[in-house]
Amino acid sequence: MRQVLNDIEAGKLAEELRRRGIPAGQRLRVVVESIEDDGLPMTAINAAGGAFDWLAGEPDLYSDVDLVERYRG
């Protein structure tokens, strides 16, 4: 059985599961995604994490000269 629960407060999750008839002993696969804005854009989180720091030592292989068509926004 697959059900998607959207916008549930963490403290009300057990109540919501009971309301939908899912017994307390049922094993579940849960993906948690906070929908609150924590104030940091994803690029800032990535930069602070350091996972992409190794790219600083990599050569720039492409420049604007390599563009076939320039984007005009």
Image: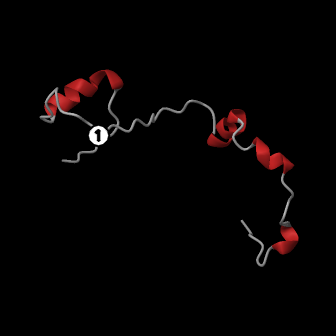
Residue 61 percent location from the top left of the image: 84, 64
Residue 68 percent location from the top left of the image: 78, 78
Q: Is residue 4 above or below residue 36?
A: below
- Mark 1 belongs to which amino acid? Leu
Query: How many numbered circles are shown?
Result: 1
The residue indicated by pointer 1 is 5
Question: Label 1: few (<14), some or many (≥20) within 10 Å?
Answer: few
Residue 16 percent location from the top left of the image: 21, 30
Q: Is residue 63 left or right of residue 9?
A: right
Q: Is residue 32 above or below residue 9?
A: below
Q: Is residue 5 left or right of residue 61?
A: left
Write the residue at 32% across / 40% down: 6
Write the residue at 30% across / 39% down: 29
In the orientation shown, which residue stands out farthest toward the bottom? Answer: 68
Residue 4 percent location from the top left of the image: 28, 44
Q: Nearer the viewer, residue 35 or 2?
A: 2
Q: Quadrant of the C terminus?
A: bottom right
Q: Nearer the viewer, residue 57 or 46?
A: 57
Q: Is residue 40 left or right of residue 37?
A: right
Please, which colouring scheme is shown? Answer: secondary structure
Write the residue at 78% across / 49% down: 55
Q: Secondary structure at mark 1?
A: loop
Write the residue at 67% across / 40% down: 46
